[in-house]
Image (cartoon, grey):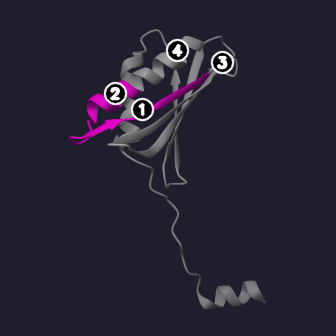
């Protein structure tokens, strides 16, 4: 499974560059790291214009062997300047298309951070008094 980490990162990187080309004069400046012993891999996504590189976020992959012996990957997506993260699970099934899953992960990353479902709500004055009292 160790080689699947690096191959899957490459598929994600390829999907990002093909489906989201940068404007003229720009290029992708991504870096990958893999720890085969721990079963983790990281893709740091950045764009480059001239000599300046701008970080955009990361994709962290973790490999797991499930109780039935099958392999599962967890992809955690993070975006620069956002506290939000998005987690996606990929389970190795006989009909699984790894390149399709990589395009799905790349598409989710391109969509940006998930919007927060929490809203600030002001409590009525009598509720605030009851809590304080």
Q: Is residue 33 above or below residue 25?
A: above
Residue drawn at the location 55% of the way across and 54% of the way down: 83
Question: Label 4: which residue?
Answer: 4
Q: Is residue 112 above or below residue 20?
A: below
The local secondary structure at tag 1 comes to helix
Task: Tell me which label, 1 or 2, sits earlier in the chain.
Answer: 2
Question: Label 3: which residue?
Answer: 66
Judge whether residue 95 can be spotted in this image.
Answer: yes
Question: Which quadrant holds residue 56?
Answer: top left
Task: Tell me which label, 4 or 1, sits earlier in the chain.
Answer: 4
Which mark is nearer the camera, 1 or 2? 2
Which mark is nearer the camera, 3 or 1? 1
Question: Label 1: which residue?
Answer: 105
Inter-mark Cα distance, 3 to 1: 21 Å
Task: Tell me which label, 3 or 4, sits earlier in the chain.
Answer: 4
Inter-mark Cα distance, 3 to 4: 16 Å
Question: Label 2: which residue?
Answer: 15
Segment colored magenta: 13-34
Q: Please state the horizontal and vertical placement of residue 98, each as a whole percent of the image.
A: 42, 17
């Amino acid at each position: 499974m160790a080689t699947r980490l690096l191959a899957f990162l490459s598929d994600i990187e390829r999907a990002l560059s093909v489906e989201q080309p940068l404007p003229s004069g720009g290029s992708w400046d991504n870096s990958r790291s893999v720890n085969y012993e721990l079963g983790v891999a990281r893709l740091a996504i950045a764009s480059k214009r001239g000599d300046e590189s701008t970080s955009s976020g990361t994709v962290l992959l973790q490999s797991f062997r499930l109780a039935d012996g099958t392999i599962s990957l967890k992809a955690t997506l993070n975006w620069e300047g956002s506290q939000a993260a998005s987690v996606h699970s990929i389970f190795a099934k006989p009909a699984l298309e790894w390149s399709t899953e990589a395009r799905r992960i790349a598409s989710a990353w391109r969509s940006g951070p998930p919007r927060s479902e929490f809203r600030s709500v002001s409590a009525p004055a009598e509720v605030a008094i009851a809590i304080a009292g």
